[in-house]
Amino acid sequence: MAKRTLESFYKPISKAKKPRVEDTPPSTYSHHPSYPFPIADLPPSIANALPDLPATTPRSITNQPHLDLLYYQPFISSTTARELFHFLRRELPFYRVQYTIRRGPTTTQITTPRFTTVFGVDDTSIFTPSPNTSTSHLVDSKSRTPIPPTKYKSTPRPIPPCLDALRQRVEAATDGAVYNFCLVNYYATGDDSISYHSDDERFLGPKPCIASLSLGAKRDFLMKHKAAEGVEAAPVKMALADGDMVVMRGETQANWLHSIPKRRGSRDLSGDERAVSMASSLPIYSLQDVSRHNTSKDLWIVIDKEVFDVTEFQAEHPGGERSELSTDIARKQSDKTVLQKVAGKDATDKFLQYHDASILSRYRERLQVGVLVETKAQEPKKGFLSRFFRS
């Protein structure tokens, strides 16, 4: 808290500020076994604004060979877009993807320069009885029989209601296109980016429709035509602002590449926030996320802005069934173990009171589950978040 001056004590007390809408905690959550934690439903302030979408009529862009775009400026009004940015940034399970490539005898570990989360499944499978229930499971879309467990390399996750409500509004605004896949990219700093690519995977069909909704700070969206003999096409550059949406349809994906380049000179983040954004492939969590893991069978704590799963250590700590008396610390049995008392909290001071910090290096690889964004005020205020709905 900032120190007050002497004069300020003699001034009339100002009226308390109205809480920001993005600070309002969610009241309901969606559960599914494939979610790393329950995902919050949209608060009324956002949900009640959805029927008014889109905020503007789109501009059609078809002035280049094979290019078919709809450009909303914006699709979502600035007030709702700002709140939606904070909500999704706080409530979705983001992570950095890691993969390995081989070039001859050389193996290289790649970490994508952005945070990502993915929901949905291709049209050969569906979630039943409904994708928005905790008991839903995948079946073949035609035979309605359970799919083999080896069909997908990674377990598909149903689109949560907070994104599904937006998907429905996008579908209604884009000539009835049906979207079954949602990719959310979070670009925490100007160094985060995505290189030129096209969303032309076979399971999307010959003419996929891709709706890209942008939230947060303004970022450049670049497009260029794939190399083709006899085709001359000028590159396309759009500065996507908060709430803007670009719909790429028709032959666009088959013939064009798009990217979000790095933005040099960005100074929007503090040192701590930049450290979080440049962390490894581990997910990032708020204290609210961590606080949900506070039971004897699922116990997380925070130590120096790192999130650890310490469930297995309860028995050896004070209050645990295998704890022993120490000459330095009086220990006794209680209803809760010491670890349970600090579950879901920042336990840095308590940890350093009894342990040397170097012990973390021994357990970090096995027990660390993520990194922490301590408060909403510390979250990147001008990050850029894009959501891709694919049909």
Image: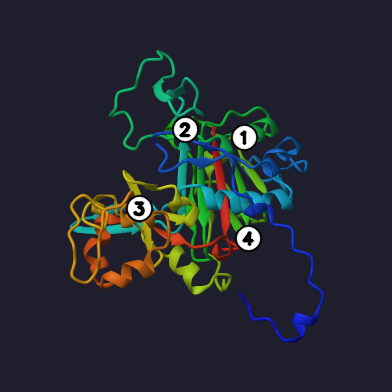
For the residue carrying disc 2, how many other residues have a C-alpha within 10 Å: few (<14), some (14-19), or many (20+)?
A: many
Label 3 or label 1, whichever lies nearer to me, is 3
Quadrant of the rendering where the C terminus is positioned: top right
The CA distance from mark 3 to mark 1 is: 37 Å
Q: Which residue is mark 4?
A: 217
* Pointer 1 or 2: first along the chain: 2
Say which label, 3 or 1, has the lower sequence index.
1
Q: Nearer the viewer, mark 4 or mark 2?
A: 2
Three-letter amino acid code at disc 1?
Ala
249 lies above or below 136: below
For label 3, the SS is helix
Residue that badge 1 annotates: 165
- Identify the residue at the far right of this view: 12
Q: Residues within 10 Å of mark 1 (few under 14, many from 20)?
A: some
Instruction: Give residue 242's mark.
Output: none
Q: CA distance from mark 4 to mark 3?
A: 39 Å
The answer to whether the residue labelled 1 contacts the one labelled 2, judged by CB atoms less than 8 Å apart, is no
Q: Out of 128 and 20, give the one closest to the viewer.
A: 20
Disc 3 marks which residue? Answer: 340
Percent position of residue 229, x then y: 51, 46
Which amino acid, mark 4?
Ala
- Callout 2: SS: loop
Determine the CA span between mark 3 and mark 2.
32 Å
Q: CA distance from mark 1 to mark 2?
A: 13 Å
Please tell me which residue is depicted at 31% across the width and 28% down the height of the picture.
Answer: 151
Within 10 Å of disc 4 (Cα), the crowding (few <14, some 14-19, many 20+) is many
In this rendering, the answer to whether 281 lies above or below 138 is below
- Mark 4–mark 3 contact, CB under 8 Å? no
Residue tagged by mark 2?
Answer: 158
Label 3 Cα neighbours within 10 Å, binned few <14 / some 14-19 / many ≥20: many
Residue drawn at x 64%, y 40% is: 68
The mark that comes first in sequence, 3 or 2, is 2
